[in-house]
Amino acid sequence: MHVDTEWRNAILGSLVVHLLLVAAMLFAAWDWTSTRRPNRTGLNIEARVVDINQFQQQMNQVREQRDQAVRAEQQRLERERRAQQRDEALQQQRDRDEQARLERERQQQEQVDRQQAEQEQRERQQAEQAERDRQAELQRQQADEAERRRQELETHRLAEQQRQREQEASRQRELEQIRQQREEAERRRELEQQRLQQLDDQQRREDEIRREEQLEAERQAAAQVAANAGRIGTLREQYQSAIQATVLAAWIRPPSVVDQIVCAIRIVQIPGGEVIDAVITSPCNADSATQRSIIAAVKRDDLPYRGFEEVFERDITFIFSNRDN
């Protein structure tokens, strides 16, 4: 940009000098023409003497003016060159200052970047260390958890083995108990069968004895009736005695029986002597087992009926006693 301006100024200065020279020459020619006489006799040749000194002075003035213009232009160009140099120097200084500022900023930025990179490096190292610590802690926790689970599994395995042993022992005990229970049940069954067989045998014997006793009782009752015919004045007394004799004959003495039993018995019967119901009423000095045996004797066989139809009563009460037995 400054070089173009300098060339433009030099060209303008050169044009000014040449214009001044041309103007000087035109001025000299015009002055010479104005002093020439008219041509009155054909072709006249006029000559004018030009003062060379004057021309030389004019030329010198022109050259002086040109030189002044050139010097002025050179001075102007020098001033512009110096101004340009100052501007360039200032621009260079500004450029250097800008470069220095940029360099300072770059260095500051590099320092900031370096510090930031160091901070990031420290943070990254801290993060990596924290991650390593976390991984180590995680591995330790996993190892502890694995050990805990192993111990739990081992404890569970041992407990399961103990439980299985206990279950096996319990099963063996249960099997032994079942075997013993079966043996005991079998023994009891055999004993029960033996007892039932004995009871059946005893029942048959008792039935035979009872039938014999009943027959004997009937015979005795008949004999007693016949023997007491004179003592018993009425058929009702005979009926009461026959009932007493029948029940007494059917009675099976329990082990807890006492002597001198006296119990009132209320009997409900139907014609034919079949007993519908029988209960012990007061008075009665027998225990519960003896009372049950008396009720069983009443219900065991039909009461006397034939020959006593006239004195038959559906609901009667008689006194059971073993005083005479």
Image (spheres, rainbow, N blue to C red):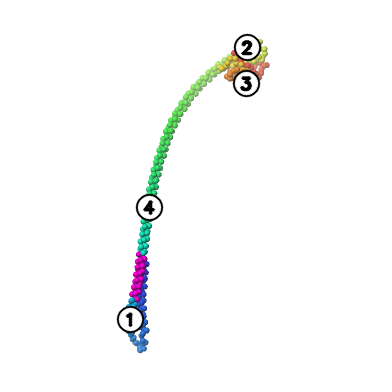
The quadrant the N terminus occupies is bottom left
Q: Earlier in the sequence, mark 4 or mark 2?
A: 4
66 or 42: nearer the eye? 66
Q: Using the numbered discs, state the Cα–Cα distance from disc 1 to disc 2 in whole angstroms.
A: 225 Å
Crowding near the residue tagged with mark 1, few <14, some 14–19, many ≥20 C-alpha atoms within 10 Å:
few
Q: Earlier in the sequence, mark 1 or mark 2?
A: 1
Mark 3 sits on what residue?
277
Q: Amino acid at mark 4?
A: Gln
Which SS class for mark 3? Answer: strand
Q: Give the percent coordinates (x, y) of residue 71.
A: 34, 73
Mark 2 sits on what residue?
224
Left or right side of 124 for 302: right
Mark 1 sits on what residue?
54
Q: Amino acid at mark 2?
A: Gln
| Residue span colored magenta | 65-89
Mark 4 sits on what residue?
115
Q: Amino acid at mark 3?
A: Asp
